[in-house]
Image: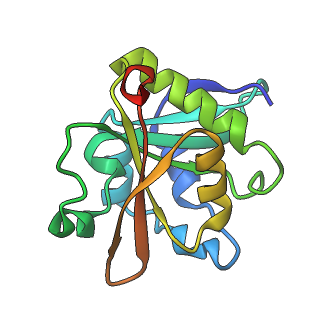
Amino acid sequence: MIVHIKEMNETLAKEILDWQYDPPYDFYNNDCTDEDIIEMLTGTYNALVDEHNRLVGFFCVGESAKVPAGYKFGVYKEDWIDMGLGMNPHLVGKGYGFEFCTSIIDFIKNRFGELPIRLTVATFNKRAIHLYEKLGFVCENRFNSDFAEFITMIKKSAEEKD
């Protein structure tokens, strides 16, 4: 699967917000509200499409990628690049994750340089955590919200690994 990154638009945002994941990943299901569409059009979200212009997934950076409950636990103190992402539910579990995430990481590095990248993931999502570890992310912090337990994972730049 060859992916291309596009600027988010209303049509893509609505399609993403209508995605329905099977349990236990239905935790990631959204409602397609005007407020959610507006958030996705703030400039922090991008879409990934395949070579046939079919929607593969999305990612966001900055505040949109953070879980609000993490603030009270101090997990977002460092000025790092926060990354959030989601893959089309029809493609999840089919072996596309590594290429999908690598495309996102490469885009972020090209745009923001070699700052560490942080992501937040629900601890039940073992499949995603395993993928992130294969990509070089390491567990940094753990916290709870009213809905789930989360971890933050960090991918440090080459200079910081030494």
**Residue 65 in the image: x percent, y percent?**
36, 49
Assign the N terminus to one quadrant of the image. top right
Of residues 74 and 49, the one drawn nearer to the viewer in this rendering? 74
Please say if 63 is above or below 99: below
Of residues 83 and 140, the one drawn nearer to the viewer in this rendering? 140
- Hey, which quadrant is residue 110 in on the image? top left
Give the residue drawn at x 50%, y 22%. Answer: 107
**Residue 112 in the image: x percent, y percent?**
34, 21
Of residues 1 and 52, the one drawn nearer to the viewer in this rendering? 1
**Residue 152 in the image: x percent, y percent?**
39, 57
Give the residue drawn at x 29%, y 38%. Answer: 42
Of residues 108 and 31, the one drawn nearer to the viewer in this rendering? 108
Judge from the rendering whether residue 107 lies leftward or rightward of residue 36; answer left or right. right
Please say if 141 is above or below 44: below
**Residue 156 in the image: x percent, y percent?**
41, 33
Please say if 126 is above or below 108: below
Give the residue drawn at x 60%, y 74%. Answer: 26
